[in-house]
Image (spheres, rainbow, N blue to C red):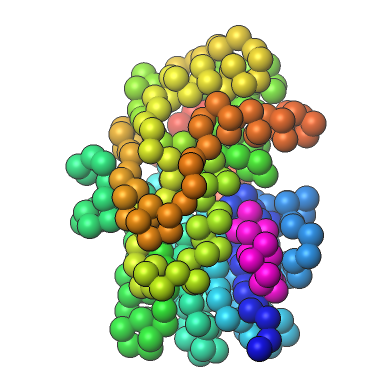
Amino acid sequence: MSPTRVLVTGAAGFIGSHVAKACLGLGFTVVGVDNLSGGFRRNLPPGMEFVEGDVRDPDGVAKLWSEHGPFDYVYHLAAYAAEGLSHHVRRFNYENNLVASAGLINASIRHGVRHFVFASSIAVYGSGQLPLREGDAPRPEDPYGISKYAVELDLAAAERLFGLPHTILRPHNVYGERQHYGDRYRNVVGIFLNQCLRGEAMTIFGDGQQTRDFSHISDVAPLFARAPLIGAARNRVFNVGADTPVRVLDLAVAVAAAMGVPCRTRHLPARPEVVHAHADHALVRDVFQPGPAVALPEGLRRMVEWARPLGPQEPSRFSGIEVPEGLPEIWK
């Protein structure tokens, strides 16, 4: 039998590069695609065939199959995951996170892909009963969550009509090595780390009482890679991440401790966001049987050890704001 050949989108990005590496570790032949808008060549794992391209482009997607395929599995992680900013870049959000996904699903159907693995988000739940469970009715409250849930529904429709098998994973607040910590719009761990590297106070929207489960990348990426190999994961949805809610205020203390600097914070006006978001992971434990999770202090230690040689980053600027009304001052 020929080796399993897989496509990983967003392969130069944070989660995508780790998923590509995990796929290589399973013995797969991996082709990765990324437009390098939010990823870096330094993230590309050795042994992966890399294609610089944009999955929003139908011709580019067709060339992936004609020049680098066929593919047994598709791991779709390419996205623009700035949830809060999505209110202000609606068109951009849907083009990147929904339209591009539909094109990949089309290609996967036409070319007989054996399994499609999709990176969704707990943003699909919105504000709901805690902890968030896979059986809860999704009520996304921002364009990012809406786009992710729309792709979930589309995959279910593609399975019903065309028999395209899939697994949907909903990770949340993932952090760790290779994260783009110069991005000012997303990933609070990376933002705090960069502010510490730059000698700045850590900025907190509102009172800092918001809670999240912060998930180290090493607890997330291997589950993506293994999903097509687990029969009980076929055509199912799983929450993926850590189990311990942490206040944003306490996260700032933990990041400062990992950096070895005093904890200095600056509070900004609150923004529209879900205040408390933590998920139940009984289903993923039952089906995937993952090992013990990386504790937050250890995960932060690893991330700081990786980031310190890279040094402080100039915070990124998004040039295509569509709706400037209500945009937080720090994002302008």
Residue at screen point 51% across, 17% down: 253
**Residue 28 at what x, y percent from top left?**
66, 72
Position of residue 66 in the picture relative to residue 277 (left or right) = right
**Residue 25 lies in the magenta-colored region:** yes
Q: Is residue 242 above or below residue 10?
A: above
**Residue 97 at what x, y percent from top left?**
47, 62
**Residue 7 at what x, y percent from top left?**
62, 73
Residue at screen point 67% across, 62% down: 25
Q: On the rendered image, what quadrant is the N terminus found in?
A: bottom right
In this picture, which residue range is highlighted in magenta? Answer: 18-31
Q: Is residue 287 above or below residue 59?
A: above
Position of residue 69 in the picture relative to residue 97 (left or right) = right
**Residue 92 lies in the magenta-colored region:** no
Residue at screen point 73% across, 85% down: 67
Q: On the rendered image, what quadrant is the C terminus found in?
A: top right
**Residue 65 at what x, y percent from top left?**
65, 84
Q: Is residue 40 above or below residue 185?
A: below
Between 84 and 311, the residue placed more toward the observer is 311
